[in-house]
Amino acid sequence: MDIRRAKQIYESSSTIGVQLEGEPVWIESVDEANGMATVQVGGTPQNTHTVSVDRLVEDKG
């Protein structure tokens, strides 16, 4: 995924599925300057990771 699309998903009022290595994630923030996103893995608020947006994949379903 590119940084522009990650930002669009983050700002969207719709629920858009995103995965990190096959696991569903929720984008919590996007750092455009560094190409990074903080994501929540699964439904666990304590399980967050900061990853490069190019590791994220949008669900196409």
Image (cartoon, grey):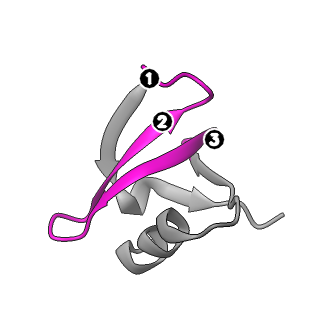
Above or below, 21 relative to 15? above
User: How many C-alpha atoms fall within 10 Å of the one at disc 3: few (<14), some, or many (≥20)?
Assistant: few
Q: Is residue 32 magenta?
A: yes
Label pair 2/1, CB-CB below 8 angstroms: yes
Say which residue appears at 61% left-offset and 29% top-offset: 42
- Mark 1: which amino acid? Asn
Comparing marks 1 and 3, which lies closer to the viewer?
1
Say which residue appears at 63% left-offset and 41% top-offset: 22
Q: Secondary structure at mark 2?
A: strand
User: How many C-alpha atoms fall within 10 Å of the one at disc 1: few (<14), some, or many (≥20)?
Assistant: few
Q: Is residue 39 magenta?
A: yes
- Mark 3: which amino acid? Gly
Say which residue appears at 44% left-offset and 23% top-offset: 47
Left or right, residue 2 beside residue 50:
right
Mark 1 to mark 3 CA distance (whole Å):
16 Å
Residue for badge 3: 22
- Mark 2: which amino acid? Gln
Mark 2 to mark 1 CA distance (whole Å):
6 Å
Residue 58: horizontal and vertical position, in percent?
Answer: 62, 63
Say which residue appears at 63% left-offset and 67% top-offset: 13
Residue for badge 2: 40
The quarter holding residue 43 reads top right
Q: Secondary structure at mark 3?
A: loop
Residue for badge 1: 47
Mark 2 to mark 3 CA distance (whole Å):
13 Å
Q: Secondary structure at mark 1?
A: loop
In this rendered view, identify the residue nearer to me: 14 or 20. 14
Q: Which span is picked out in magenta?
A: 20-46
In this rendered view, identify the residue nearer to me: 12 or 42. 12
